[in-house]
Amino acid sequence: TLETEEQQRLRFQIELEFVQCLANPNYLNFLAQRGFFKDQSFINYLKYLQYWKEPEYVKFLMYPMCLYFLDLLQYEHFRREIVNAQCSKFIDDQAVLLWQHYTRR
């Protein structure tokens, strides 16, 4: 069945919000600890979300770092490592340092 315009708009909003949540390493750790990254359907969904890298979609992103994490989530090794709280904390600390450096300019 075809989506109505309203359903398309709602799906766009939900997927936009979700893909931007991927910029948060603590959220990635949350997903990993609950087994989402072991679910092939969820992994397929992450592959599907790569359309956000296209110019007509990327312009809507407020947190472009989410695309970097979306890329990393395509790798099983990263999905296994992000379950470790120390890993997500290290990534989070590095992101904060990056933002501090660039906001000083």
Image (tube, grey):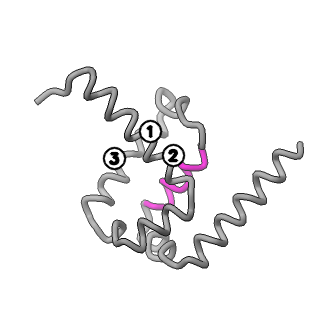
Mark 3 sits on what residue?
A: 48
Q: Secondary structure at mark 3?
A: helix
Query: Which marked residue is nearer to the observer: mark 2 or mark 3?
Result: 2
Instruction: Compare marks 1 and 3 and give the one earlier in the sequence.
Output: 1
Q: Name the spot of residue 56 as percent of width and height, x first.
A: 47, 26
Q: Secondary structure at mark 1?
A: helix
Residue 75 inside the magenta-drawn segment: no
In magenta, the rendered stretch is 64-73
Q: Amino acid at mark 2?
A: Gln
Q: Secondary structure at mark 2?
A: helix
Query: Which marked residue is nearer to the observer: mark 1 or mark 3?
Result: 1
User: Gap in Å between the C-alphas at discs 1 and 3?
Assistant: 13 Å
Q: Quadrant of residue 25?
A: bottom right
- 15, above or below 97, in the image: above
- Give the residue at x 66% y 72%: 90
Marker disc for residue 20: 2
Spot the residue most to the left. Answer: 1
Marker disc for residue 16: 1
97 or 48: nearer the eye?
Answer: 97
48 or 104: nearer the eye?
Answer: 104
Q: Name the spot of residue 4 as percent of width and height, x first.
A: 21, 23
Q: Amino acid at mark 3?
A: Tyr
